[in-house]
Amino acid sequence: MQAPYLKQFPDENGFFGKFGGSFVPEPIAKAMEEINQAYNLIAQNSDFIAELRKIRKHFQGRPTPIYFAHNLTKEYGGAGIYLKREDLNHTGAHKLNHCMGEALLAKFMGKKKLIAETGAGQHGVALATAAAYFGLECEIHMGEMDIAKEHPNVVRMKILGAKVVSVSRGAKTLKEAVDSAFEAYLSDPKNTMYAIGSVVGPHPFPKMVRDFQAIVGIESKEQFLEMTGELPDIVCACVGGGSNAMGIFSGFIDDAIDLVGVEPLGRGSALGEHAASLSYGSEGVMHGFNSIMLKDSHGEPAPVYSVASGLDYPSVGPEHAYLHSIGRTKIAAISDKEAISAFFALSKKEGIIPAIESSHALAYALKIAPELKGKKILVNLSGRGDKDIDFVVEKYGYGE
Ligand SMILES: *Cc1c(COP(=O)(O)O)cnc(C)c1O
């Protein structure tokens, strides 16, 4: 019998087929190898596993439920629509799943400080939360544009005791924040740990973050079977870097069901108007890993745009590039307009205000549901929309 997929990938050098790996200068390579070794040790350690289990149950509030969206299902008249409620995680999104793991690893390695970038601010809030829990210092780099757009999360990070560094170079969004955070990390790799916010970056981060997020898929499979007696026909999730998607996909990867990654189509398919890396990108190395990315005419990372700050990244986790290349996953793209319409649909019909990021995955489900009567779609509702309400109301009003 073939080994389960998750045991086979990535290989020991962090490759998923030709994607992934570690393309970084010497000092970072050394630091990454140190993290890799510590992670391999700790991942086998029963104290570590027990500690993480305890944290998930008593601090994060796991397991998060699966909810059958009965009103939306009825209204769209086709496939049953189910939601994995990651929005009910402490801090309001799936990101705490990997942040608590990364912070526990940092503690184990004797680090004093956590450094990271953040887009919508969700990773920053989750990491600041983890830092507070473990008594570590925390420094978050964030693009000036995102700071303006995601004010409540900036305030939350500061209340939690983190230092927020405003990044004003380039497009002033997520990509520049990653560069800035990496530089800060390199100035003191001995005492700090760089806690990447998704399944991106050099090895071992794509693997490690996936492993920490896999709890979403493990729970989902068990809960869905218990609830319906079957597996879902389709599992979908929004893809920025791809951590919430890899988390839920992990639980179903060896099963014969459709896995769909939903990318942000923004204002349209012209370069610069979207962040749909897998839909429109090509192979290239960025931020230390080989994947599919959006490039400008000089082969540099292209400017990207999405109404969802957490999705506007010009590349994607290498495992997504691999799974898509072998046909195991499908990719769809959802526009700003469709996402906002799904945001209001879930709010008004089910009483759940979703993050704009998560609204992309939901919009895809709503789009295909009418044609799929008798099927079941499971959507990973990666986060809640409290952080987005001021922005949405200012730009779109209160919906019909
Ligand atoms: C950050 C974020 C995302 C995108 O990150 P992935 O790594 O692609 O999962 C999606 N949804 C929410 C709510 C987020 O905060």
Image (cartoon, rainbow, N blue to C red):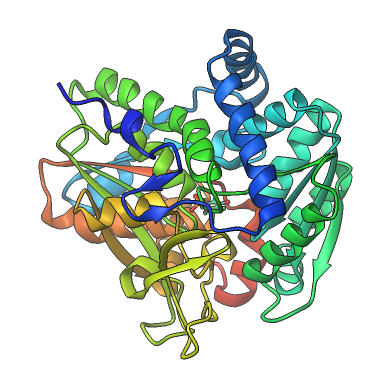
Depth check, front residue: 239 or 229? 239
Q: Position of residue 362 (x, y in %)?
A: 37, 53
Identified at 53% across, 45% down, the residue is: 203
Nearer to me, 125 or 190: 190
Number of dots carrying numbers: 0
In the rendered image, the quadrant that contains the C terminus is bottom left
Q: Percent from the top left, x then y, of residue 371? A: 12, 56
Quarter of the image with the N terminus in it: top left
Given the current orientation, which residue lies at the most extreme front position?
26
Is 84 positioned to the left or the right of 367 in the image? right
User: Which residue appears at 53% of the width and 16% of the height?
Assistant: 44
- The residue at the point 60 percent across, 23 percent down is 61
Q: Residue furthest bottom?
A: 297
170 w.r.t. 191: above or below: below
User: Residue 101's x, y, as percent?
Assistant: 63, 30
Q: Residue 158: in sight, yes or no?
A: yes
The answer to whether residue 68 shows anywhere in this view is no
Q: Is residue 341 above or below residue 37?
A: below
